[in-house]
Image: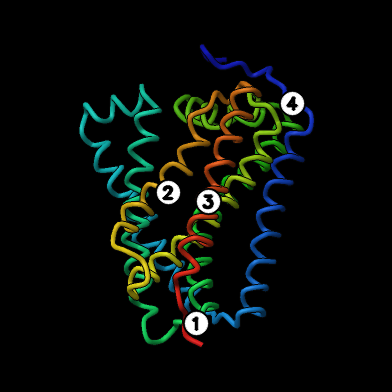
Amino acid sequence: FMEGIDLTLQLPDGVEGMIMAGGILLLSFFIVMFIVVKKRWKGKLMPFFLGFITYTVFVFMCVNLITSALALIPSVDTAFTYNQTAYIIVYYLLAGIAFLIARMVLTRMLTERFETRGDVYMAGLGLGIGDSILYGVTAVSYYVWCIAIRSEGLESAFAGLSSEDVISTYESISTLFTSPIILWFLLGISCIMDMLIQFALVNTAYGQLKGYLPGYWSMLSVGIYFVNAISFQLYDSQSVVSIAISFAVKLVIFAASMYYALYVAGRQIKYEE
């Protein structure tokens, strides 16, 4: 059909189930956490929406705008196209700075109105859920492609698409054929960890704003986000060993980050009753 595209590829057994399992786990975790914060710590809904709005404006919109602007520079676009590692590093550096600004704005909006533990927790949950929604949309898209390919075959699924659309679509879904199926479940767990990191860092941002934590927490929070995010990005998607090592590294970094942010630093933060 087209050079470099094999339309006879078959999906690995169980890939749909793993995609669904990762998505269901993420959704279930969020629902349980939302209910616990709401009931246990009396968190209000407004801080949650404020957190989601700050994510939308300062992270989603700004980071995508900046990366799109950078791509307009021919030399940068070429570098990003042929060096995905460079693109990933630049993207997550920008996202780390954007999340820092979002947390600073968010905690200032909470001041004098929403300063209970539950309110700050809700704000962190709202900021952290943004990337999870993007992952959910991607997971649904992949699942729909799996159903279409299973029922019709890859060639029929591509019927009616232009050559350019076939190439771009094939590149975007090729990992469905080449990656170990466990990757899709681990991505759901990774997304939960990323959400919890933002949950914890909103609390440290609040503590810093109120004077309970020193100023270096601003840059430290960027570093914590960056190493957590990047640790499960630079793996070989076709290697189970590479994926397992990368995920294990992320798990260790995540555990250390959460312990330091919520236990070591968290004990110094005082909330309103």
Alpha carbon separation for disc pair 1 and 2: 25 Å
**Whole-percent x, y for residue 237 in the image:** 58, 26
**Vertical arrangement, residue 248 with respect to residue 33, above or below:** above
**151 vs 78, nearest the viewer:** 78
Q: Earlier in the sequence, mark 1 or mark 4?
A: 4
The earlier-in-sequence mark between 2 and 3 is 3
The disc, 4 or 3, on the residue closer to the chain's N-terminal end is 4
Three-letter residue code for mark 2? Ile
Query: Label 4 is placed on what type of residue?
Result: Pro
Would you identify the image quadrant in which residue 245 lies? top right
Q: Give the side of residue 151 with respect to residue 216, left or right.
A: right
Frontmost of labels 3 and 1 is 1
Graded by Cα atoms within 10 Å as few (under 14), some (14 to 19) or many (20 or more), the crowding at tag 3 reads: some
How far separated are the C-alphas under marks 3 and 1? 23 Å
SS class of the residue under badge 4?
loop
Left or right of 156, for residue 50: left
Identify the residue under disc 2.
Answer: 224
CA distance for labels 2 and 4: 35 Å
Q: Which residue shows up at 64% across the image and 29% down it?
A: 244
Identified at 44% across, 27% down, the residue is: 164
Residue 116 is marked as 1
Where is residue 149 shown, x and y percent of the image? 70, 31
Residue at 41%, 61% (x, y): give it. Answer: 55
Disc on res. 194: 3
Q: Position of residue 33 (x, y in %)?
A: 65, 66
Dot 1 or dot 2: first in sequence order is 1
Which label's residue is closer to the chain start, 3 or 1?
1
